[in-house]
Amino acid sequence: MKRLHLVTEGHGDVEAAPELAMRVLVHLERHRSWRITKRSSRLPKGQLVDERTGAAKVEGIEKAIAFASAQRADALLVLVDGDDHCPATFGPSASQQLTQRLPASAVMVVREFETWLALAHTDVPLRKAESKRNAKELLRTKQPDYKPTVHQTPLAKAVVVAELLARGSTSFDKFCREIDRLTR
């Protein structure tokens, strides 16, 4: 069985992002030939993204590759929150560095990982969810005591991929397309 490893930035993402990636594998019907490492490796965003330009930092990408190698991964996906950066800057610069070493990709979420969870579990419109930072507040409308390290993983496990894709998030669509490409 082949293994896909994720590198993420947030403490809550360490377990939640692999769960969401697994939901995507099931949706793609690749879960019999691929698995996701149970925990992602964590690198703070400042090590992965140049705050001034939004481009990938070479040193951070090198660390991500080292993490994937240590996990004996067959492929790597780097996932970071966009916050106020443009995903079209980060993704290509990171992917250029990544693909020179192993099948890999990088995805920047429009705003933050919780944006996808808010879209999956609330009726908030896409434009509102992606228009400003702090999707945690959107999640608190359903889960008043929301804490990323406690609630992200159960929320990720409950995502219905087809429904979330239908909400129209371009960054979630990119996440799914990249998992598809890496595991094809």
Image: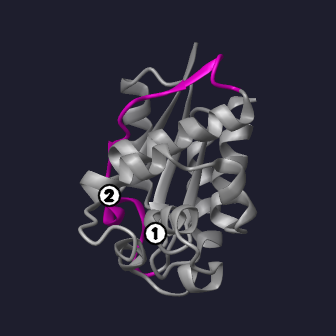
Outermost top residue: 1
Image position of 177 (left or right of 87): right
Which is more N-terminal, label 2 or label 1? 2
Could you say where residue 119 lies in the image, as x and y percent from the top left?
A: 57, 68
Residue 10, numbered circle? 2
Q: Residue at x 46, y 60 (%)?
A: 80
Q: Is residue 114 above or below residue 38?
A: below
Distance CA(mark 1)–CA(mark 2): 10 Å
Q: Residues within 10 Å of mark 1 (few under 14, many from 20)?
A: many
- For residue 168, which quarter of the picture? bottom right
Which is nearer the eye, 97 or 78? 78
Image position of 97 (left or right of 51): right
Task: Give the magenta-colored segment's residue range.
Answer: 30-52
Q: If the image is split into quadrants, where does the C terminus sit?
A: top right
Residue 112, numbered circle? 1
Q: Is residue 137 above or below residue 47?
A: below
Could you say where residue 181 lies in the image, as x and y percent from the top left?
A: 74, 39
Residue 103: tell me if it is visible: yes
Q: Residue at x 65, y 17 (%)?
A: 33
Q: Residues within 10 Å of mark 2 (few under 14, many from 20)?
A: many
As for residue 51 lying within the magenta part, the answer is: yes
Q: Residue at x 44, y 65 (%)?
A: 114
Q: Secondary structure at mark 1?
A: loop
Could you say where residue 120 lies in the image, as x and y percent from the top left?
A: 57, 61
Q: Amino acid at mark 2?
A: Gly
Classified by dominant secondary structure, the portion drawn in magenta counts as loop
Q: Amino acid at mark 1?
A: Glu
Residue 19, numbered circle? none
- For residue 35, which quarter of the picture? top right
CB of mark 1 within 8 Å of CB of mark 2? yes
Which is nearer the eye, 87 or 95? 87
Could you say where residue 117 lies in the image, as x and y percent from the top left?
A: 49, 62
